[in-house]
Image (cartoon, rainbow, N blue to C red):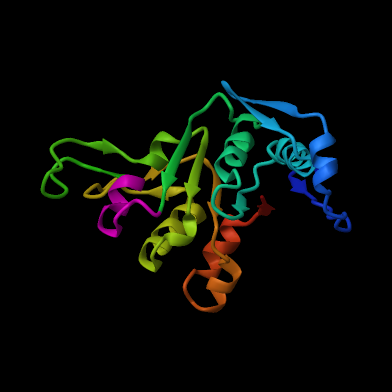
């Protein structure tokens, strides 16, 4: 329920898990997501995508959790394409694949001469996602120093390219995904609590 700038999310009692027979007998549903289509045969997944469609209308950050291979990336794409930002870019960042020493350059960009090999200015992923959505895949793999740098951007909407002196702004909605138990990682001091709360405006479990 959205009232002005306030969005309320009501959770009902958990329904009984559908049996295999009921899943097989359900009519598949095709969901158009941008230029692609997702075929849903599980009633629970149909309900999930209906929720994503409603949730996409708000500006809340979304955290998508679930095991590897359950379709978290498809869900993130749905949030973007169902939203008012669908005409903007969807920029994906695999947090597990970026070395820590290159994280700032990939996320924020760099200026010419900022480090050895920086032969020209480079736009970062956050800058290129402005007006659209940035998808932080496997966000639970970020090391703590990188978490602190990401948190600052989420708090202020401002960042600087590596080697730069000018503050730049980004207007990108954040959707993150992980197969890790972030609340437990927060308790173990492996993930920043303030970053977790910044990312988890609403949590979707796939």
Q: Is residue 3 magenta?
A: no
**Residue 85, image x, y percentages:** 59, 30
Residue at position x 70%, y 36% from top? 57
Query: For this view, does 131 lie left or right of residue 203?
Result: left
Q: Residue furthest top?
A: 35
Residue nearest the observer in this picture, 168 or 1 = 1
- Residue 128 location (% of width, % of height): 40, 34
* Magenta: main secondary structure: helix
- Report if residue 1 is visible in the image: no
Name the residue at the front extreme.
Answer: 21
Quarter of the rendering containing residue 50: top right
Quadrant that contains the N terminus: top right
Q: Is residue 62 left or right of residue 98?
A: right
**Taking 195 as reference, is 165 above or below it?**
above
Depth check, front residue: 143 or 160:
143
Residue 98 at x, y percent in the picture: 33, 52
Q: Nearer the viewer, residue 92 or 179?
A: 179
Position of 135 relative to 10 (above/below): above
- For the record, the magenta segment spans 96-108
Within the magenta stretch, is there residue 97? yes
**Residue at 76% across / 48% down in the picture?**
6
Q: Look at 30% across and 59% down and name the residue there.
A: 100
Q: Image height check: is 53 above or below 182?
A: above
Residue lying at 61% horizontally and 49% vertically, measured from the top left? 61
The extreme left residue here reads: 116
Circle count: 0
Is residue 100 visible in the rendered structure shown here? yes
Give x and y (percent) for residue 146.
Answer: 37, 61
């Amino acid at each position: 329920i959205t009232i002005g700038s306030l969005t309320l999310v009501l959770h009902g009692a958990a329904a009984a898990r559908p049996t295999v027979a009921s899943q097989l007998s359900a009519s598949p549903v095709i969901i158009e997501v941008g230029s692609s289509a997702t075929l849903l045969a599980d009633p629970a997944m149909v309900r999930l995508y209906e929720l994503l469609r409603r949730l996409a209308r708000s500006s809340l950050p979304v955290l998508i959790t679930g095991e590897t291979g359950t379709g978290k990336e498809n869900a993130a794409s749905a949030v973007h394409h169902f939203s008012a930002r669908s005409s903007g870019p969807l920029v994906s960042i695999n947090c597990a694949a970026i070395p820590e020493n290159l994280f700032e350059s990939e996320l924020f960009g760099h200026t010419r001469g900022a480090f050895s090999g920086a032969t020209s200015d480079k736009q970062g992923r956050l800058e290129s996602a402005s007006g659209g959505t940035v998808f932080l895949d496997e966000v639970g793999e970020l090391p703590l120093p990188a978490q602190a740098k990401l948190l600052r951007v989420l708090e202020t909407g401002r960042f600087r390219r590596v080697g730069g002196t000018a503050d730049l702004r980004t207007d990108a909605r954040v959707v993150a995904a992980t197969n890790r138990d972030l609340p437990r990682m927060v308790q173990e001091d492996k993930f920043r609590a303030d970053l977790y709360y910044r990312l988890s405006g609403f949590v979707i479990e796939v």
